[in-house]
Image: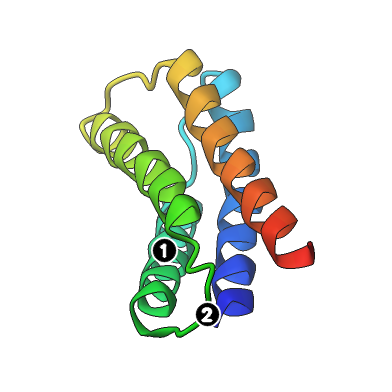
Amino acid sequence: MVITAVILIAIAVFLGGYLLTYVLDQKIPPKAIVFAHGTAAILGILVLLTFALTTERHHKHWDSFIIFSIAALVGFYLFSRDIRHKNVPKWLAVVHGSVGLGGLAWILIHILH
């Protein structure tokens, strides 16, 4: 189940990197990619939450869940600005991406250790 969450979040990180190029170039990101990014991220977070609530393992990945939830909250804010045709702050998009990428690295370190 954790592997499924990691795959979904990795897809979200990859798509997010692609979207970040649009934000940094001050272009309008493609909505299909925006929705695919958000969907993959939300599904990954939900799978991770399901794992944490149902597993008997010692490490339930609550730390990773919190990191990704913070990134998701910032993502919702960025999405709300984008949908209202307001400029997305570049610095916040970079922070959002950094938190997501850092969360992916964090969970991978715990899985591979």
Position of residue 110 relative to residue 69, above or below, is below
Left or right of 104? Residue 65 is: left
Q: Nearer the viewer, mark 2 or mark 1?
A: 2
Residue 57 is tagged as 2
N-term-proximal mark, 2 vs 1: 1
Secondary structure type for disc 1:
helix
On the image, the x and y values in percent for residue 111 come to 70, 66
Reading the image, the residue beneath label 1 is: 45
Position of residue 66 relative to residue 79, above or below, is below
Secondary structure type for disc 2:
loop
On the image, the x and y values in percent for residue 107 come to 63, 56
Question: Dot 2, crowdedness within 10 Å: few (<14), some or many (≥20)?
Answer: few
Q: Quadrant of residue 62?
A: bottom left
Residue at x 52%, y 73% (from the top left corner): 58
Residue at x 27%, y 33% (from the top left corner): 77
Q: Nearer the viewer, residue 52 or 41?
A: 52
Left or right of 81? Residue 64 is: right
Distance CA(mark 2)–CA(mark 1): 18 Å
Q: Nearer the viewer, residue 14 or 19?
A: 14
Q: Nearer the viewer, residue 90 or 28?
A: 90
Going by the numbered disc 2, the residue's amino acid type is Arg
Question: Dot 1, crowdedness within 10 Å: few (<14), some or many (≥20)?
Answer: many
Position of residue 71 relative to residue 88, above or below, is below
Residue at x 56%, y 39% (from the top left corner): 19
Position of residue 69 relative to residue 82, above or below, is below
Residue at x 49%, y 38% (from the top left corner): 29
Q: Is residue 27 visible?
A: no
Q: Which quadrant: the C terminus?
A: bottom right
Residue 18 is tagged as none
Going by the numbered disc 1, the residue's amino acid type is Ile
